[in-house]
Amino acid sequence: MELTTVWFLLIAVLWTGYFVLEGFDFGVGILLPLLGRDESDRRTLVQSIGPVWDGNEVWLIVAGGATFAAFPEWYATLFSGFYLPLFLILLALIVRGVALEYRGKSTSTRGWDRAFFWGSLGPAFLWGVAFANIVRGVPLDADHEYTGSLLTLLNPYALLGGLATLTLFTLHGAVFIRLKTDGELRERAGRLVRLAGPAALVIGGAFLVTTQLMVGKPATWGTVAVAAAAIAGALVATLRGRDGWSFAANTVAIVAVTVTLFASLWPNVMPALDPANSLTVDNAASTSYTLTVMTWVAVLFMPLVLAYQGWTYWVFRRRLTRAPGG
């Protein structure tokens, strides 16, 4: 297997890990106003992701760094053409991080809770918009420069992609809260799973079917079916009180959606509306020497990072009870 293919797959894995882990972080923030009826509830919800949220964001940093090093042409075109949406995502993540850090240090938490909500909802929607545009294709000239505008990116298919990731991450947050809490908070999260599950199934299904009809490959019909079955499985598991299975099933759904998008993209990394101007794994890649060095670094350090993050989740695996006071 060529190193360009290896790094395309590794970047797909990094984005998959980011969406799986940061997805429930986003979901918790989105659901904070709905589930947090008082300060004790809201404190418990924030504490459910408190030990892990910043580690989950590392996946985004590594994915961006890997793209810059392995496919610099892709990185340059993506970050110049998608400058405003990516800037808004970065701004939202900064606001969200500040809110999580300073919430417990303030006598009034309502402003920080609003920042946490909008800082979660914005990226959950905009990541879907961005990836839908990448898969669909954007106007590029012969120098691989983006020639469209912001309105070009806000097409109906991309907006549907944003709604798909928004509903899927909201569902992911609901099943995570049900897994991590007990009592009335857990029961309310279960009721939201029953609402978010069908919404994610319908909207996500519409997005994936549209993707298949536009740019999909025959093999990815299988991953579409897996995504639909996994969302349905998460809903059924919640109804039966199997929270661990529900979270695992929704994780499979997010993995299947991400695999569908990257498989539909291959061998392009940034398709153009004129195929002659598309960026591929070959014309966007770094030199063979660079990819070789990067591969050895990944082989040596990725297992350590995964082991550390796995240990963190193991240490903080217990359910949280409702925080006292409020």
Image (cartoon, rainbow, N blue to C red):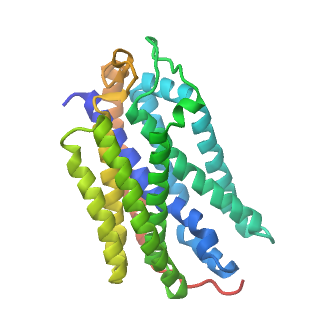
Residue lying at the far right in this picture: please name it. Answer: 107
- Give the vertical position of 86 relative to 170 (above or below): above
Picture residue at 34% right of the left edge, 54% below the top: 205
Instruction: Find residue 56 and report its horizontal and vertical position in percent.
Output: 48, 55
Residue 96 shown left or right of residue 183 in the figure:
right
Front position in the image: 96 or 70: 96
Picture residue at 52% right of the left edge, 63% below the top: 27
- Give the vertical position of 60 relative to 190 (above or below): above
Instruction: Find residue 314 and report its horizontal and vertical position in percent.
Output: 40, 70
Residue 1 shown left or right of residue 156 in the figure:
left
Picture residue at 59% right of the left edge, 75% below the top: 35
Instruction: Find residue 293 and report its horizontal and vertical position in percent.
Output: 34, 29
Q: Is residue 300 visible?
A: no
Q: Quadrant of residue 254?
A: bottom left
Residue 173 shown left or right of residue 44 in the figure:
left
Check the picture and name the quadrant holding the C terminus: bottom right
Q: Is residue 95 visible?
A: yes
Front position in the image: 193 or 92: 193
Instruction: Find residue 200 and report its horizontal and vertical position in percent.
Output: 41, 61
Number of callouts:
0
Residue 196 shown left or right of residue 256 in the figure:
right
Q: Quadrant of residue 15?
A: top left
Q: Quadrant of residue 201?
A: bottom left
Front position in the image: 166 or 5: 166
Residue lying at the far top in this picture: please name it. Answer: 142
Front position in the image: 298 or 196: 196
Check the picture and name the quadrant holding the N terminus: top left
Picture residue at 46% right of the left edge, 22% below the top: 139
